[in-house]
Amino acid sequence: MLIETVTPVFGIILLGFLALRFGWFSESATRGLVAFVFNFAIPFLLFRSLAQTELPTDTRWGFLVAFYGGSFVTYGLGMALGRWVFHWRLDGQAIFGMSAGFSNTVLLGLPILLTAYGPEASLPTFLIIAFHGPTLMPLTTALIQMGKGGRVSPGEQARVVLLELVRNPIIMGILAGLVANFAGLSLPGPIDRVVELLGGAAVPCALFSLGASLGTYPLTGDVAPALAILPLKLVIHPLLVWILAVPVLGLTGIWVPVAVTMAAMPSGVNAYLFGAHYDAAPGVAARTLLLGTVASVGTISLILFLFTRG
């Protein structure tokens, strides 16, 4: 089962990477595919899955505490690494922190979790995705602005969070799916078929677009910071989440593997996008993204083996 799960996922990523590198797929086509995945395919997949999923009556909200507790601690460790070892300013430290504590939840985490753990993983996976951007992106924005001499008021931070919720089609898909589920609503047959077809394209298109996107990122920057961040992201982050989830909070069931596996995902692409947009350690973020995705083949395979061997 492990080989059947991991090989297709990373095989499609590799295909997308090679397609971009050999000129079979252009950068403009990659941007278009990513836009399709984020704005249509994944929102419709999330909507339909949540609308039709039988939601558990005993939602373990503590798993969010475990996941984000581990994420924030790892984020802080990444910042400390950037400050004390590599001597970056606060804006660069924020990119170190984001590269260490911000997982690739959508393009990689979503396909792997749903493939490995099945429909039962839908709700906890979608809950993590719903809070991921609004939780960590405003923090990174504030730290970068302070590092560059700007000030971000609490009101501005609240505005950033609200806009993230309103403008994000993925979050809207999650909320709409939950509303439809609670209200007992169902789509007419032909419309449901359209939503099903769009959602069915989400997983392969997300993986292919991730591989093609990796092929567009520059390889600038020293490799040493990336190699220092990788153990934090791929080992320390999931280990901290497991410690909080099991020994501390006593979580059981599907909540534990979902939280730990999502924490083991490599850095999300937004870490590089933030670094490039604000000119804050973009080379470090790019190298971490590339090397982390490659290294995660082994670490994710190990975690999936540990959780699925029984």
Image (tube, rainbow, N blue to C red):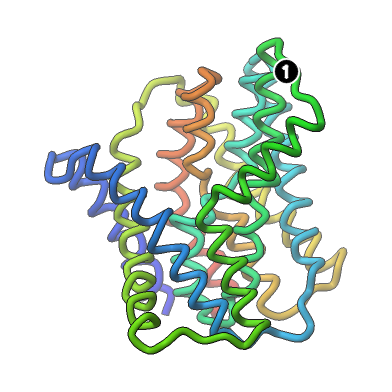
269 lies left or right of 165: left
Is residue 16 among what the camera can see? yes
Q: Which residue does the image show at 31% across and 60% down from the upper left?
A: 205
Q: Quadrant of the C terminus?
A: bottom right
Is residue 3 among what the camera can see? no
Figure check: 263 above or below 200: above
In the rendering, at what x and y percent does residue 165 appear?
Answer: 63, 50
149 or 85: nearer the viewer: 149
Q: Which residue does the image show at 53% across and 35% down from the upper left?
A: 271
Label 1 crowd (10 A; few <14 / some 14-19 / many >=20): some
Residue position marked by numbered label 1 in the rendering:
146
Q: Which residue does the image show at 49% across and 64% down from the upper left?
A: 110
8 or 167: nearer the viewer: 167
Figure check: 212 above or below 300: above
29 lies left or right of 92: left
In the rendering, at what x and y percent does residue 169 appear?
Answer: 50, 55
Q: Which residue does the image show at 78% across and 51% down from the upper left?
A: 69
* Amino acid found under the numbered disc labelled 1: Met
In the rendering, at what x and y percent does residue 299 appear?
Answer: 51, 56
Which residue is the extreme one toward the right? 248
Total marks shown come to 1
127 lies left or right of 116: right
Q: Quadrant of the N terminus?
A: bottom left
Classify mark 1: helix, strand or loop.
helix
In the rendering, at what x and y percent does residue 293 appear?
Answer: 43, 47
275 lies left or right of 7: right
Figure check: 171 above or below 52: above
